[in-house]
Image (tube, rainbow, N blue to C red):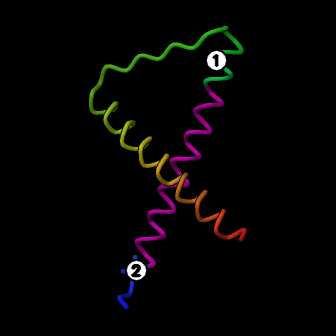
Amino acid sequence: MEKKPRISRHLRRIIHSLGFSCIGAAIFLQVLVFVDIFRQGYFMAVETNMAILTVELILTIFAVIYFFYIYRWFLRWLK
């Protein structure tokens, strides 16, 4: 029987820090958007810098994957 490769404790801590930061930033930005909608009645965001768009897309994908990872871990923990 082969052992599964384990991620080092330091790397795991970095991944969790980045993941929780992405999720926290997403919640903070949603609050800002809802406040703007509440004040003006609409929200309009335009970004033309491709570097910023690429980084935002990568962080969003990472946050979604991390969210499902934590959700799956939590469901396993409940059993």
Coordinates of residue 31 in the picture (x, y in percent): 66, 30
Q: Amino acid at mark 2?
A: Arg
Q: Is residue 61 left or right of residue 41?
A: left
- Front-lying residue, 48 or 7: 7
Q: Is residue 44 left or right of residue 56?
A: right
Residue at 50 percent across and 54 percent down: it is 66
Q: Is residue 40 above or below residue 19?
A: above
Which stretch is magenta? 9-32
Coordinates of residue 15 in the picture (x, y in percent): 45, 63
Q: Find out whether residue 43 is within the magenta segment.
A: no
* Residue tagged 1: 36
Residue at 47 percent across and 56 percent down: it is 18
Coordinates of residue 7 in the picture (x, y in percent): 40, 76
Residue at 33 percent across and 32 percent down: it is 52
* Residue tagged 2: 6
**SS at badge 1:** helix
